[in-house]
Structures are given as structure tokens and as C-alpha cells.
Image (cartoon, helix red, strand yellow):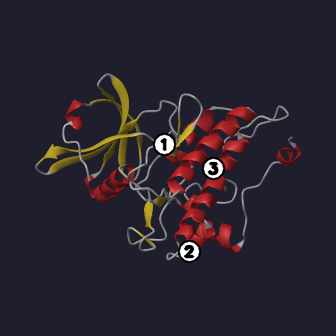
Amino acid sequence: LQVQRTIAKQIQMVKQIGKGRYGEVWMGKWRGEKVAVKVFFTTEEASWFRETEIYQTVLMRHENILGFIAADIKGTGSWTQLYLITDYHENGSLYDYLKSTTLDTKAMLKLAYSSVSGLCHLHTEIFSTQGKPAIAHRDLKSKNILVKKNGTCCIADLGLAVKFISDTNEVDIPPNTRVGTKRYMPPEVLDESLNRNHFQSYIMADMYSFGLILWEIARRCVSGGIVEEYQLPYHDLVPTDPSYEDMREIVCIKRLRPSFPNRWSSDE
């Protein structure tokens, strides 16, 4: 793992812009430019290490994957901060953006196409002397995709990702199948039937989560003068913070899925 030991000292932290189970996200200034700084709790060192490792994968860079700048460790003695420094996007997450923005068809397709382009790059193994393994995200949701100034998206938050080692036909870490955000978990993760020996299973799980994100995007597109208010998938079927059991009952047992407005099928 390459850690750039000087960069954290050069960053001026400006304001906190988010927080999650892993720590906080700050907007900072570095060499006159705005950057995003993800500061991990010391208890989340494995997540920091993993995300840094994934970002440093050869041939990982892509316009629709969040641009990685550096990883650093800052601290003395018992006090340590783990930094992950990336490009800063002032529109914030796709979740934030959709809550405050309605879309025309062109803007909707731009968000969808750019997101799937990033995901496709992540999922694709590149065969060359400096090859890139196939990578599954495992925590896709609208809060883990960022919106750039030009209205395109980039995929972020890779702390739960797994790489596929094609030589050995294995994923590179012992996978815990039930990871991610419960609301976005596919049926095979909720009922623990996902085939861990088959990397394609992880790809398919990502695609289920991505389908829910497409539903979120499409609801905010104006057609025939009508647009739905922003909602999370399954907003009308499960509580705000659903349990595994809540999701399993709706997705696996009742086999329900987010509903489509009638106007979608009549839209040309």
C-alpha cells in the first residue's frame, strides 16, 4: 500500500460535508484546489486500507470512478487519523442531487449512462501486462455515487469492494456475504443464498442494486409535466431504517419491487 506521508499536513480542512459508519467527509484545500477528505475512525482501519487498496489498483482510473489523490496517516502516539483524499464534487451525492433537482430526459440519461459506465469499468477485467482485475462494489446506492459539475456521475465508496483473481478463480478477501446497505440488498444476499464461489454472483448483486438507483433517477424525470417527489426504493413498503427481516419479507417472501408510474410505459 502506498501511503503519501506528507499530504495530510498540507491540507487545510475547511468544512465537514458528510458522515457515515466509517467516519467523516470534509471539504479541504490542497495546493489551492478543493479536495474531499474522508477521515476514518481508527476502529475502521480495515475499511480505510481496503478502499485505498482498491483505488490503487492498476488501470483503475476512469472518468466515472471517483478520482483518487492519496492516502495518508496523521497522528502522534495514541491519536491517529486515517485520510483518504479524492476529487471534490460540490453537487454531492446522487441522493442529495435528486432530492433537490428535477431532470429532463437528457439529464436523466446522462446520470444513468455515466453511472453504468463507471460500474462497467469496475466490473471489467482488463487483460494486459499491467492488467486490472474485475471488481464488485457490494454497496451500491445513490449515496455512494457522486454528481460532477457537468451532470455526469462517478462511483465512490469502495471500502466493501472485492477483486476477482482469475488465476485462482477466487475473490481476494474472505467474503462476508451480508454486507452493504439493507435497503439495496438483492434477494440472494438477504436470504444468504448468494454463491460465493462464483464471482458473477457479486456482479449480479451489484446490478440489482443499480436497478434500484435507476428507479430513483427515473422518478425525478419530468414527462407530460409530471414528476414524482424523490423517494428511496421501497419507501412505501419498509420503515426508514429497515431490518434484514423487513427487507427479506418484502423482497424474498412477498417478492415485491418498487412500483412504476403508469406514465413511464406510455412515454416515448
> Residue 232, which numbered label?
none
Three-letter residue code for mark 2:
Leu
Q: Earlier in the sequence, mark 1 or mark 2?
A: 1
Inspect this view and state whether residue 103 appears: no
Q: Residue furthest front?
A: 129
Query: In the rendered image, which residue does mark 2 sit on?
Result: 194
Badge 2 crowding class, 10 Å Cα cut-off, few under 14, some 14 to 19, many 20 or more, is: some
Q: Is residue 246 above or below residue 212?
A: below
Residue at 50 percent across and 53 percent down: it is 122
Between circles 1 and 2, the one closer to the viewer is: 1
Q: Is residue 245 above or below residue 259?
A: below
Q: Is residue 231 left or right of residue 29?
A: right
Q: Earlier in the sequence, mark 1 or mark 3?
A: 1
Image location of residue 11, percent across then percent down: 26, 31
Residue at 67 percent across and 43 percent down: it is 217
C-alpha distance separating marks 1 and 2:
29 Å
Element under disc 1? loop
Please identify the quadrant where the C terminus is shown. Answer: top right
C-alpha distance separating marks 1 and 3:
20 Å
> Residue 62, which numbered label?
1
Residue at 61 percent across and 54 percent down: it is 210
Image location of residue 259, percent across then percent down: 77, 55
Three-letter residue code for mark 3:
Ile
Q: Earlier in the sequence, mark 2 or mark 3?
A: 2
Three-letter residue code for mark 1:
His
C-alpha distance separating marks 2 and 3:
21 Å
Badge 1 crowding class, 10 Å Cα cut-off, few under 14, some 14 to 19, many 20 or more, is: some
Element under disc 3? helix
Q: Is residue 253 left or right of residue 87?
A: right
Q: Is residue 30 left or right of residue 193?
A: left
Element under disc 2? loop
